Image (cartoon, grey):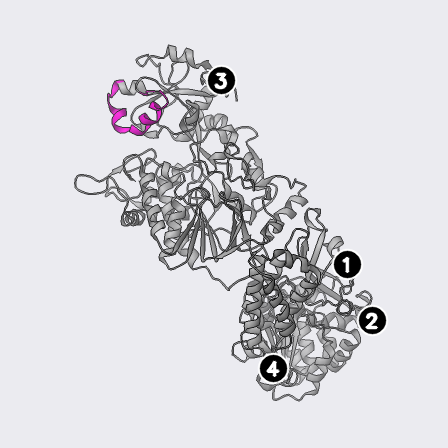
Amino acid sequence: MEPLNQLLLHPDHRVGADLTRWQAHGGGSALSAAAADPAAVRELVRLADLRGLGGSGFPVWKKWDVVAAEPARPDKYLVVNGNEDEPGTFKDRLLLEETPHQVIEGAVIAALAVGANRVVFYVNPDLARSLTALKLAIEQWRAAGLTEIAARALGRPLELELLPGSGHYIGGEETAALEWIEGRFPFPRGKPPYPAQSGVHGCPTLVNNVETLAHVPHLVLYGVDWFRGRGIGRGTGTKLYSLSGDVLHPGVYELPMGTPLRELIYAHGGGLLSGKPLKAVFTGGPSNTLLTPADLDVALDFDSLRECGGSLGTGAMIVISEGTGVVKRVAEYVRFFAHSSCGQCPPCKTGTATLSRLLDRIDTGRGTPADLATLENLCAMLPNSGRCHLLNGVVQLLDSSFRHFHHEYRNALR
Amino acid sequence: MNKTGISFAAARAAYRPDADLGPLPALTDPDTLLAACHPDHLRGSVVKLAIGANAGDGCQRELAELLQAEAFIDEADLAGTPVTDTDVLVIGGGGAGCAAALAAAERGARVLLATKLRLGDSNTVMAEGGIQAAIEPDDTPQQHISDTLRGGHHAADPALVAALVADGPDAIRWLIRQGMQFETTATGDLHTRKAGGMSAARIVHCRDYTGLEMMRVLREAVIQHRGIEVWEQSPAVELLSNERGQKCVGAVLGSLADGRLRIVRTRSVILATGGLGRLHLNGFPTSNHLGATGDGLVLAYRIGAKLRELDSFQYHPTGLVHPTHLSGKLVTEGVRAAGALLVNGEGRRFIDELLPRDVVSAAILRECQEGRGILSVRTDKTRLGVWLDTPRLERSQPGLLERQFPKLLARTRGAGIDPRVDPLLVHPTLHYQNGGVLIDVNGATTVPGLYAVGELAGGIHGRNRIMGNALLDIIGFGRRAGVAAVAERDRGPKKVTLEHVNRMRRALTLAGMPLTHKSPRLLPAYAGGAWNR
């Protein structure tokens, strides 16, 4: 089934680092439109209810307004976060690889809207093809004088920089990205101060996800009503869903924000492999709650999922069918997070490691009832004791697996 | 295949070691003979692969069924499975696996070597002739390269052949350091022999059991090395991939002892599972050992590795036909080299016995197809063959068999046959897999983290292997892969999944193929059939 409303992944936009072809399909016109009145873009973004698509779902306009209100000291930064490293998420790499100009245009418009003069494209170093495409595209922008146009609208020179990340999962956390940009190990910072007030080198800094910024050009071109009309129900615009796991057609699907889970899995994903029944869906990072067959009709937008106790996260949907052990899957993910913990907050450093160890014991049939009780107690104690969200995410994942699949844990005990 | 021929009793009664064999018919066009009679060209023998990295390529039919099949295990089977972490996992306990394990362990890696049967149960031990290395004054590496390429009908990858040849002398030196015995001349130099298709004497050997001697020292070295842990009776049931199914990060090992599964997580996996003779392609007997069921090809293909020359196999001309329990066992090429002739059921010679193996095999098959073969005594399973005229050899060179081929005499005497008196009934036997997994000079496959060495690897021998290159190949590429596997970049524990199995399932579903066939085979049907937990 071919989706009708492709915006980000419209075939006209998927031209790679080819400026001529991109411009032939109207690329760059949003920048010209926005350059006339950059401040108006903020209003557009607010009315369109554009959200942070890197996982938070935070209203974009709030961050933008704060950064726009801050004076430059002497610079203002925009960090385009393309560190994408979560299990099951593979949308930003596609945007960077196939539509680098769209991402750059969105970023430059955002920079104008908040008055940022330094744009840093912060990309996972393992995504070689994304890096190559983006590097080429940035050079094409400079050569074609597009940055000059933006600089004139901004009133000062605009710098575009491509910075490969450190290769750590935690580097995707927004304050960790700031540390890496400043040349240090990506330890997340305490908040406040928020990056919008004091980010890179103390300058006001806007950090947005690649997908979020890629939406900006067509929002500027076609307007708020058109954009809102792309979504279903409370969702606005479209969303890139990374569908993976036991489905027939895994992949990135651009669908209206608010598409029901059932439609994503069965209409687009082609249903489950070998015709097995659905068991659960790991969403987002997967440091989120699990969805079960009871949630099949829930709309996949930030608000609807929050109401049913879940979270959309990055839009990653890792589908598992009956016959997959939840304990083993959770143990795998928690091991990933334990490995990814930066180690600066003791509760997270030791907490995730302990959770992982206990889960491994239970998963391999060596766990005791005391181990399971310890796990549950830790899940009550650990949340909110780290600087960043990592520990909370792990606990959320565990908690929700307890809620739905407690019997599997009990059955795995010695 | 035509199953008529001259009865064994009649042929044996008519046989005289001093009979006139008639003139040798001229062989005008070996290519026509190959196309007409070689098993690779049998009608219906080769099919096109529909899915996977080699979709569209020709592949032997029985092998294609295994390559395009469902895995034995599902995620559900992994619940509660114990996990072992190691740096390098070597799958296969033959010469290539041991060489790879030693090379990796010598560089400080923790190595786990898992083998389906016992350490050393392999085709390596059956190699009788020797190992090639260009070490004589009148020989050059270039000649070795040329001989190998020509022998392989110029289908081999020149870079791999160059690497193979360059490793030759050092491989011998390394083997000697491990304690391997070689035949020496009176002055203490290595003794070399010249064999078919070689432009210089290049075969270094240890009597007529070079492979056995090699396996002896490799086995001891592996057992004694502190960095290597050996798991016997632990066949690999499936590989494990990262969450995108694009990198090999471990394997699921079964156990023939208790039937349980074990997960091994690792930086890199070296497949050294050998050949597939026990699949009995086209119904042929085989010279291979019991475990040679092509598991490595199946596992590598499912995780996405590209293979090559899947339609090319070597059938050794002289495998025993009877007694039945020795069916397929080799009579070494040395017997023909020493002067033994091939005689059909009508008492005639039909081919120059020292032509390349594929041509001689095709000629024997032609005789059998055209009714000049000899029907085996055991008619419950009709087997055809031709005489290998050993009594005539004994008459012309008395005592030669006793002196040079004691192993052959011992083997046949046990079955009540004396080759000095009775001609041996022989028929081509499935001997070697010419193609295999596509590799680079380090044994790396097209899948990151996955290496393939030994008979499993393809591209080294082209479409026909010449004698002595197999033993060189397992040592040379085995050690190269061991070194490269240790250097594999690793960013810590990513997930170990069966995502590549899902990918194969998707492809099977989309191609409308059944999900009911399961592979790898692990053991031949007559040895317990598909592995049953």
How far apart marks 3 and 2 lie (CA) works out to: 85 Å
Label 3: element kind:
loop
How far apart marks 4 and 3 lie (CA) works out to: 85 Å
Question: Is the residue at mark 4 from the same chain as the one at mark 3?
Answer: no
How far apart marks 2 and 1 lie (CA) works out to: 33 Å
Q: Could you tell me the amino acid type at mark 3?
A: Thr
Foreground tag (4 vs 2): 4
Looking at the rendering, the stretch of residues picked out in magenta corresponds to: B395-419
Residue A300 in magenta stretch: no
Are there few (<14), some (14-19), or many (20+) residues within 10 Å of tag 3? few
Q: Residue at x 43, y 42 (%)?
A: B156
Q: Could you tell me the amino acid type at mark 1?
A: Ala
How far apart marks 1 and 4 lie (CA) works out to: 38 Å
- Residue tagged by mark 2? A225
- Residue tagged by mark 4? A190
Q: Position of residue A400 (x, y in %)?
A: 69, 65
Question: Is the residue at mark 2 from the same chain as the one at mark 1?
Answer: yes
- For marks 2 and 1, the one nearer the N-term is 2
Label 1: element kind:
helix
Q: Which mark is residue A294?
A: 1
Q: Quarter of the image holding residue B88?
A: bottom left
How far apart marks 4 and 2 lie (CA) works out to: 38 Å
Q: Position of residue B16 (x, y in %)?
A: 33, 12
Report the front residue among B43 and A217.
B43
- For marks 4 and 2, the one nearer the N-term is 4
Dot 3 falls on which chain? B
Dot 4 falls on which chain? A
Q: Is residue B506 left or right of residue B111?
A: right
